[in-house]
Image: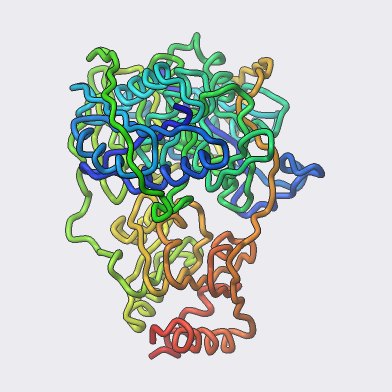
Amino acid sequence: MDILIVIEDNNSKVHRMGLECITAAQQMAKESGLSIAALVMGSNADDLASQVTNYDINEVLTLKHELLSSYSCDGYAEAVKQVIDQESPKYVLFGHTYQVRDYVPKISAKLMKPFIVDSISMKSDGEQSVFTKQMFNAKLYSDMIATDEGPLLISFQSAAYSSDNAVSGSASVRDISVNLEPSMIKTESEEPFQEESGGVDLTSAEIIVSVGRGIGKEENIPMAEDLAKTIGGELASSRPVVDSGWLSATHQIGSSGQSVSPKMYLALGISGAIQHVVGMKGSKNIVAINKDPEAPIFEIADYGVVADVLEILPKLTEALK
Amino acid sequence: MKIAVLVKQVPGSESPLPLNSDQSWLDGNGISYVMNECDNYAIEEALQIKERNGDGEVVVISLGPERVQKVIREGLAKGADRAIHVQIDSDALADPLIIASLLTEAIRGENFDLIFSGLQSDDLGMGQTGIIVGELLGMSTASLGMATELSDGKIKVKRELEAGFFQWVSMSLPASITIQSGLNTPRYPSLKGIMGAKKKEINVLTPNLENVKQSAKKVYVPQSDKQTVMIEGSVDQVVDKLVETFRNEIKVV
């Protein structure tokens, strides 16, 4: 095949970003007539296969091996590397998940082939594929090109393509195998766990008041809390606020926290780094207050105020009371 | 315990980002550079391990033009023992495979027990260098480290997963671990440290740049496809307009 999509297992469900990759692959194939296969691995491979055979792709490859029954970076990297060797795809697509960030650079090193990460869109300039990537905390975009013969490894940012646009069809299933030895796997993993139980469920909140570095100091957090209470919303934050210990990790929105899509997301002093934006860009209305007019949060805001949040916040709460 | 810390100098979060005339990269003039944020945490983790063990060596390694010696000195001032500067003239190298290969060749003979690096850089955000270096050196690797525990030639790393989950992963040394921000409290250099850093050794290497495998064709300021309504005026006017927007446009009050 020409395009290989590596599907991630999310508790025996196809990871949402795997479906988004199907949309991306179909768009690539439509323009160039390329063939598409999806790879599913591990003990849930059959389950995952049945969830992707009804899309318009050529093949689903199922790979089962006892050393792939749970995730390890060494096992997954070696397995996918061998599949690439066997199948010789031109492009290998991944969702830019935490798991992909963990093992795919190893495939790049094993093959000495480039891995273009976290792309938000793909186009052709007539000669080659161009992959747009956010850089410098999303303040600039860069059109990346591979200057190497394939296979080319690519990961797409969450929601770069919509799974709603994936075209239905039917795909055949083929079992494949790889050679893995226990000695290849150098890490031993324990069960995943959550740090704090009974945390704040922000995903069902209608209104979210979220604070970033611009709130200045821990002593200013109650001002935002007061606004959240007044307006009937939940308090959330970006990563730096949690790193500084001003709020617990359960409040964190973004790639390492919760993903939300409330009716209103009020971003107070949040610059809009990619890691934060991926967790809130689906919000129906984004209102951003930031003193830096260049802050990338304004790129995605519906309403923007260039001002110091500390000046606006108390008066806004007062006016809403 | 011999620990390498890979650090990178990047434009500060408030620095202007002027583009060069053909928009192939930034114009280096007018940019204020700082140490990549999570690299500070990587240095701190290495220094704490050395201090707990009572012996060992922490070596700061950075790739880039001459200017990167500023962050190297910062690492030395914080307490690293010596440094390696892999000097290349290009400002526009955006290929993690080549960056990692150059770093790998620079440290291959050092036989480090541990390599720490920030999980990604605030400029390119590729997030691959530390893992590729580890793989090329045949080491164990782990990404997104939120805590480390060392015992009996093994390291246990608390990895951050998605959606608020974590996982402990243990592996034999040598290992290359990428470090997430927030796992410790990075120290500031002391005055004594700053003075002492001037005497510490920086080994400067000047390798040939290999053919890159990926590169930036064009860099540009994104055009927002969203129409942002900017609310302007005095503080009181802005507050009034916000309340009106909440009430009549978004309909949340």
Q: Residue at x 40, y 76 (%)?
A: A223
Question: Where, by quadrant of the figure, is residue B28 drawn?
Answer: top right
Q: Which residue is drawn at 36% across and 49% down?
A: A256
Count how many numbered circles sit on residues in the image: 0
**Residue that lies at the very extreme toward the top in this rendered image:** B109
Question: Where, by quadrant of the figure, is residue B191 drawn?
Answer: top right
Near-viewer residue (B216 or B41)? B216
In which quadrant of the rendered image does the N terminus of chain B lie?
A: top left
The x, y position of residue A190, in whole percent, is 19, 33
The x, y position of residue A139, in whole percent, is 61, 53
Q: Does the image show residue B24?
A: yes
**Residue that lies at the very extreme toward the right in this rendered image:** B21
Compared with B59, A249 (above or below) is: below
The x, y position of residue B33, in whole percent, is 65, 43
In which quadrant of the rendered image does the C terminus of chain B lie?
A: bottom left
Q: Does the image show residue B55?
A: no
Q: Which residue is drawn at 65% across and 29% down?
A: B64
Near-viewer residue (B152 or B136)? B136
> How is this picture coloured?
rainbow
Near-viewer residue (B216 or B93)? B216
The x, y position of residue A68, in whole percent, is 24, 25
Compared with B140, A158 (above or below) is: below
Whether residue A196 sits left or right of residue B42 in the image: it is left
Near-viewer residue (B28 or B148)? B28
